[in-house]
Structures are given as structure tokens and as C-alpha cells.
Amino acid sequence: MSIKATTGQNAAEAAQQHGMQLEVVKHTEAKRGFVLLPRRWVVERSFAWAARFRRLARDYERLASALAALHYLACAILMLANLIKTFARS
């Protein structure tokens, strides 16, 4: 879902209209410059793996269920490849 309002009370109201609760999480300490967020690389890695599948790179599918099925298929292929590597090592 895309919410156009990004700040203030409007964002909370827009989120509530979509059945979501907006919660702002702030760091305990103010930090300046680049700060590495913990475990963000896991999400980025997953997106990169999904991007390797050409059908998932663009929105070609008409049905959301077909797109979801392709995501499941891509994840299954990735997990099987990882499983094969694990068995090959042992």
C-alpha cells in the first residue's frame, strides 16, 4: 500500500484508513553521518536474489496470485540450490 502523506498527523490518519498503525521509532542516541543499521543486509540480499529471476524484475503478471506463485517458485529454487550446496560440501 502506498501512503502519500509522509509526516505528522496526516501520515497517522492515512495509515489508519488502510488498517495500519503508524509507529515512529527513534534511536536512543542522536547520530551524525552514516550509521550501519543492524541486519538490514538480510533484506537487501533477499531482494537481490529475487531480482535474479527475470519474471520478477518487472511487473508482467496480470494477477497478484500469479506473481505470488512466481515468488514462491523463486524462493523454492533458491532454497533447493542452497540445499544442494550444503549436501555437496558434506
Image (cartoon, helix red, strand yellow):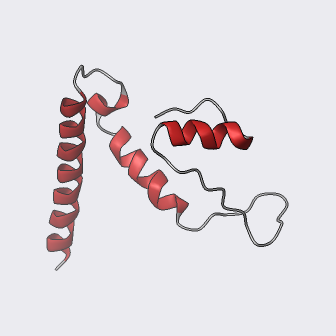
Q: Position of residue 41 (x, y in %)?
A: 51, 59
User: Does residue 34 appear left or right of residue 74 in this picture?
Assistant: right
Q: Position of residue 63 (x, y in %)?
A: 22, 24
The residue depicted at 47 percent of the width and 37 percent of the height is 18
Residue 11, relative to residue 75: is it above or below?
Answer: above
Residue 23, relative to residue 86: is it above or below?
Answer: above
Identify which residue, 36 or 87, lies in the foreground.
36
> Splitting the image into 4 quarters, where does residue 19 fall?
top left
Residue 69, relative to residue 84: is it above or below?
Answer: above
Q: Position of residue 62 (x, y in %)?
A: 24, 19
Q: Position of residue 44 (x, y in %)?
A: 48, 52
Q: Quadrant of the C terminus?
A: bottom left
The residue depicted at 18 percent of the width and 50 percent of the height is 77
The residue depicted at 23 percent of the width and 62 percent of the height is 82
The residue depicted at 36 percent of the width and 30 percent of the height is 57
User: Does residue 80 appear left or right of residue 50 in this picture?
Assistant: left
User: Does residue 13 appear left or right of residue 44 in this picture?
Assistant: right
Q: How many marks?
A: 0
Identify which residue, 6 or 35, lies in the foreground.
6
